Amino acid sequence: MIWNPSEGFELGPLTIRFYSLMFVVAFGIGWYIMKRIFIKEGESLEKLDTLFIWTVLATLVGARLGHVFFYDWEYFRNNPMEILLPFKFQPEFHFTGFQGLASHGAAISIIIVMYFYSKKVIKRPLLWVLDRIVIPVACGAIFVRLGNFFNSEIVGNVTTSEFGIKFLRDKYTPSDVISITGINDINSAYSAVITDPKYATFLEQVPLKHPAQLYEAFGYIFVFIILWLLYWKTNYKEKHGLIFGFFLVLLWSVRFAVENVKESQGGIEESLGLFSTGQWLSIPFILVGIVFIFLAEKPLPKDLFDNDVNPDMLF
């Protein structure tokens, strides 16, 4: 299979990029899921609007900073203006959009923001909020990885398996195909490499690679279904931290597994070795998740609540 999607579609003078559209879909479905949860829990939908805004900002800012510090600090330490600006200044100034988002950074940022949301807005224990917010987060992760697939990024290693895909836009940059074909329209140039026999040699040079984005998205579907069922079909939501713990273990285990067939993205793996950067960052989340599952299942000591301490306010 040859994968050569356009970056998006034209809507008047604007180009709607599929990657950005997947984020919109993720946040939209996430809002709907949390609306159902808030209605079930008897919470005001005004508080949901605040949660939505805070979560969107936490996701985007955290994901960006995660990429900066975990994956490409050597570059950004010398180009700090590019951290939060959609431009590159080296080797020349040009618009790039926000390239480089890291899910581990988004996760950390969301947890921090949920702490303040639990204290300042909804007045519920932090773990109550986290047990519920992770359900739409797991759903959103599916669409983010589909966005990566449309962008032909975060691809897997070269493979001979029947699942292998030729990611044309991963092999050749827009300037490459324009130089190869002499066609100035980028989409037409990419199409020519596929359809015109005189460019067959260039097409043959595109290796088959694992569609790691799809593997991850497929895994996240099951994570979402499991969390959804735990919330709606069991009493696990009454045990603060249990659903959150399952989320940490399940989602980051999927990430850890898929990293085995994913191309290196650089980052801290270059100094730590053994595992990829994504795997190193996933390990703490998995371990913390196991702790939350264990603590949620284990009854707290009765004397812990002496002096009229409300156990719900521990988190």
Image (cartoon, rainbow, N blue to C red):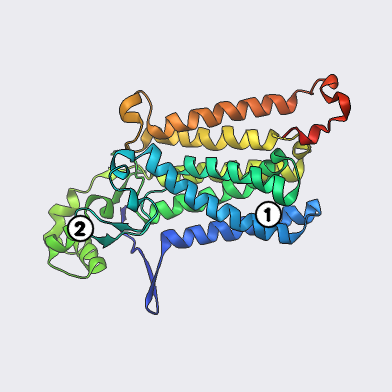
Residue ID at (52%, 48%):
141
**Element under disc 2:** loop
Residue ID at (73%, 56%):
36
Residue ID at (37%, 45%):
211
**Element under disc 1:** helix
* Residue lying at the far bottom of the rendered structure: 12
The residue wearing badge 1 is 34
* Residue 237 numbered tag: none
Tell me the mark number nearer the camera, choosing from 2 and 1. Answer: 2
* Residue 92 numbered tag: 2
Q: Nearer the viewer, residue 250 or 158?
A: 250
> How many marks on residues?
2
Q: Is residue 134 above or below residue 8?
A: above
Residue ID at (15%, 56%):
200
Amino acid on which the number 2 mark rests in the picture: Glu
Which image quadrant is residue 280 in?
A: top left
Q: Position of residue 156 (x, y in %)?
A: 34, 41
Q: Is residue 38 left or right of residue 96?
A: right
Q: Nearer the viewer, residue 60 or 265?
A: 60
Q: Position of residue 165 (x, y in %)?
A: 32, 48
Disc nearer the start of the sequence (2/1): 1
Circle 1 crowding by C-alpha within 10 Å: few under 14, some 14–19, many from 20: many
Q: Is residue 133 left or right of residue 183?
A: right
Q: Position of residue 257 (x, y in %)?
A: 45, 32
- Which quadrant, please, contains the C terminus? top right
Can residue 82 be seen in the rendering of this structure? yes
Spatial CA distance of label 2 from label 1 is 44 Å
Circle 2 crowding by C-alpha within 10 Å: few under 14, some 14–19, many from 20: few
Amino acid on which the number 1 mark rests in the picture: Met
Q: Position of residue 10 (x, y in %)?
A: 38, 74
Q: Is residue 272 above or below residue 8?
A: above
